[in-house]
């Protein structure tokens, strides 16, 4: 699914710039829930931004499902990302003037995936899947943090992308709601999605199949968890 070869990222500044990622080689299979961990400044967010095509590497190559992402021009990259990657942010990033339903429909409108009525029906199904269909006609400000994050996950699924990337999706949530969101992401992987998540959560062995540890822009460990043999999803109580 994902192959990185000699990937480096240098940000301008100071003498020689700041090395965020230092010649990373990494191969991740499809259909896994991968937790990317490490201290602040280790390069976690930079790594998933490069894989998602949000940013470009300074060196090396990134292949996702056979596509050399770093070789696409801007227009082709935007089209590829819209159909192949769903992004979940720590701060939700729902548009405040649109209802929850309209937020979930937006990626389908952008990529012209479905006509409006079918897009609406799919958005409602996705909101039901994540447990917030009853909030569809509300603005984001009317929802709790956990509800907004679940709506953001529904939006990430709008175009049925094979890859979901999540940058600290539980960072603004209480522990109970965070557990529900982690279980939801694990269930998505069980359903066949590849999920990459940057996290500061201390124990991801209950949810993730693989834990990749970064330090100073390098991969220092890659471990398959005891739960790698996928367990069946369980009922989740949403806050």
Image (cartoon, rainbow, N blue to C red):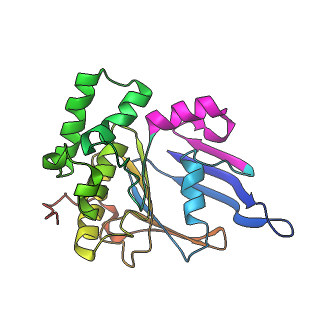
Question: Looking at the rendering, which quadrant does residue 180 occupy?
Answer: bottom left
Q: Which residue occupies 27% across, 76% down?
A: 175
Q: Quadrant of the C terminus?
A: bottom left
Residue 66 location, x and y as percent? 56, 36
* Residue 159 in view: no
Question: Residue 219, can we see it?
Answer: yes
Magenta range is: 60-84
- Name the residue located 53 percent from the left edge and 47 percent from the top edge: 52
On the image, the x and y values in percent for residue 128 come to 16, 45
Q: How many marks?
A: 0
Q: Residue furthest front?
A: 97
Q: In the image, what residue occupies the spot 26% across and 45% down?
A: 100
Check if residue 64 falls in the magenta segment: yes
Q: Is residue 171 magenta?
A: no
- Residue 78: x percent and y percent? 55, 34
Above-or-below relation of 28 to 45: above
In this view, the residue in front, 46 or 112, is 112
Q: Picture coordinates of residue 141 (x, y %)? A: 28, 56
Quarter where residue 234 is shown: bottom left
* Residue 182 in which image quadrant: bottom left
Q: Residue furthest top?
A: 115
Of 147 and 33, nearer the camera is 147
Is residue 112 toward the left or the right of residue 61 in the image?
left
């Amino acid at each position: 699914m994902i192959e990185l070869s000699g990937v480096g990222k240098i940000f301008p500044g100071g003498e020689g710039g700041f090395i965020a990622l230092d010649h990373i080689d990494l191969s991740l299979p499809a259909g896994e829930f991968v937790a990317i961990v490490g201290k602040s400044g280790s390069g976690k967010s930079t790594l998933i931004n490069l894989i998602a095509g949000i940013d470009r590497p300074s060196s090396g190559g990134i292949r996702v499902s056979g596509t050399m992402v770093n070789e696409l021009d801007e227009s082709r990259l935007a089209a590829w990302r819209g159909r192949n990657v769903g992004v979940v942010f720590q701060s939700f990033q729902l548009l405040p003037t649109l209802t929850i339903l309209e937020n979930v429909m937006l990626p389908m409108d952008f990529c012209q995936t479905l006509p409006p009525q079918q897009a609406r029906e799919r958005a409602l199904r996705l909101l039901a899947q994540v447990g917030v269909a009853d909030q569809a006609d509300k603005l984001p400000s009317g929802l709790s943090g956990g509800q907004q994050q679940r709506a953001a996950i529904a939006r990430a699924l709008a175009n049925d992308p094979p890859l979901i990337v999540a940058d600290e999706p539980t960072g603004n949530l209480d522990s109970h709601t965070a557990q529900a969101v982690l279980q939801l992401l694990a269930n998505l992987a069980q359903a066949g999605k590849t999920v990459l998540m940057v996290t500061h959560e201390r124990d991801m062995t209950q949810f993730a199949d693989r834990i990749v540890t970064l330090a100073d822009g390098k991969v220092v460990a890659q471990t398959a968890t005891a739960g790698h043999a996928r367990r069946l999803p369980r009922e989740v109580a949403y806050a």
